[in-house]
Image (cartoon, helix red, strand yellow):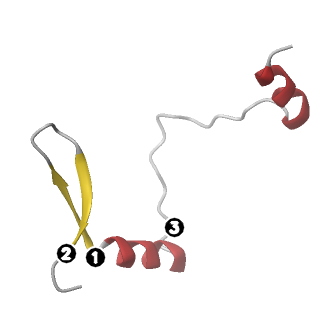
Amino acid sequence: MKVTDRLRFWFGPATQGDVEAPVIHKHDDFEHASEEDLGHFVVESDEEGRHYGVRKEGT
């Protein structure tokens, strides 16, 4: 018995929604707090195409 079969036995089958459906933003307090926290960062890329979150100057 594979690990995935054991997990399926205990937790049931994975439920998958419509992957083509648009993401629904709730605009609740948690989302506003997350946007505020992430607003202090900017994404930069290096020469090899890797991306980094860098804190903005002065924050």
Q: Amino acid at mark 2?
A: Lys
Closer to the chain start, of discs 3 and 1, is: 3
SS for callout 1: loop
Closer to the chain start, of discs 2 and 1, is: 1
Q: Position of residue 17 (x, y in %)?
A: 61, 37
As displayed, is residue 31 above or below residue 48? below
Q: At 56% from the left edge and 35% from the top edge, which residue is drawn?
A: 18
Q: At 46% from the left edge and 50% from the top edge, which residue is drawn?
A: 23
Furthest residue in direction front, as rendered: 47
Q: CA distance from mark 3 to mark 2?
A: 27 Å
In this rendered view, identify the residue nearer to me: 25 or 38: 38
Q: Amino acid at mark 3?
A: Lys
Furthest residue in direction bottom, as rendered: 58
Is mark 3 in CB contact (under 8 Å) with mark 2?
no
Is mark 2 in CB contact (under 8 Å) with mark 1?
yes
SS for callout 2: loop
Disc sitting over residue 1 in the figure = none
Q: Which residue is mark 1?
A: 40
Q: Quadrant of residue 44 in the image?
A: bottom left
As displayed, is residue 40 above or below residue 58? above
Q: Position of residue 53 (x, y in %)?
A: 27, 60
Q: Nearer the viewer, mark 3 or mark 1?
A: 1
Q: Which residue is mark 3?
A: 26
Q: Position of residue 52 (x, y in %)?
A: 25, 54
Furthest residue in direction top, as rendered: 1
Q: Which residue is mark 2?
A: 56
Looking at the image, residue 32 sits to the left or right of residue 28; the answer is left
Q: CA distance from mark 2 to mark 1?
A: 6 Å
Q: CA distance from mark 3 to mark 1?
A: 22 Å
